[in-house]
Image (cartoon, helix red, strand yellow):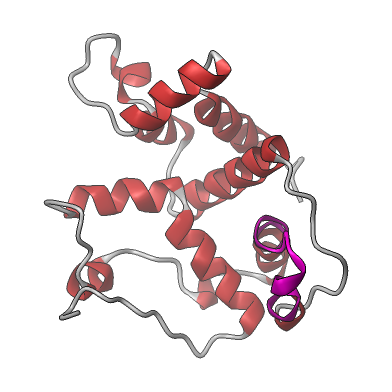
Amino acid sequence: VGNSAVVVQTTAPKRMETALWAAFSSIVFEYLIRQKLGGTNINFFILKQMPVPTPDQFDDEEIVFVSERVVELSYTAVDMAPWAESVGFIGAPFEFNPLRRAKLIAELDAFYARKYGLNREELRYILDPSDVKGDGYPSETFAVLKRNEMREHGEYRTQRLVLEAWDKLERGELH
């Protein structure tokens, strides 16, 4: 496979690994990696250049915030029980509820936007540049996502949910 089969290994505690997985899955990370790529292949040297919050940048409360959401998003079948237990969760799998999942993902996206040091306006730009720069702005970050959600939900739901989660985080309403 040459240099394209990236395997990320860490010596961080299992629960801390959830923060790494969530960072790699965040909309901010996706935006950042799109700025580095010239195509669709992520070589190891590109991944090594990417800014990713490190374990020492999280306090215990933040790890709980992230890991609870990652577990609920990931542990939806009994075959994932060993993994869930390895990160400290004991219990039955979570129901696969698309709206609940969208909200959890939005909460993680808002959390990581803050972790990356963005402000609300910068997050709005990442989600939809024309929302900040005005109609006709020649750039779209997540055009396919936006178009699919407009067709399916009648709105760019990800943008709304992420900004709602951002506002809740700012007010201290998400724990």
In front of the other: 17 or 77 = 77
What segment is highlighted magenta in the picture? 68-83
Residue name at image x 76 percent, y 51 percent? 175
Residue furthest out toward the left = 38
Which image quadrant for residue 110? top right
Q: How many marks?
A: 0
Residue name at image x 27 percent, y 27 percent? 140
Q: Is residue 171 visible in the rendered structure shown here?
A: no
Residue furthest out toward the top = 135
Prevailing secondary structure of the magenta residues: helix
Q: Is residue 25 visible in the rendered structure shown here?
A: yes
Q: Is residue 140 left or right of residue 93?
A: left
Q: Is residue 77 left or right of residue 33?
A: right
Q: Is residue 42 left or right of residue 62?
A: left
Which image quadrant for residue 79? bottom right
Quadrant the N terminus occupies: bottom left
Image location (x, y in percent) of residue 20 = 50, 69
- Tell me: residue 102, above or below residue 132: below
Residue furthest out toward the bottom = 11
Image location (x, y in percent) of residue 11 = 51, 90
In front of the other: 21 or 54 = 21
Which image quadrant for residue 160? top right
In front of the other: 77 or 5 = 77
Q: Is residue 75 magenta?
A: yes
- Tell me: residue 7, above or below residue 171: below
Residue name at image x 59 percent, y 70 percent? 18
Residue name at image x 18 percent, y 54 percent? 36
Image location (x, y in percent) of residue 109 = 53, 46
Q: Is residue 127 magenta?
A: no
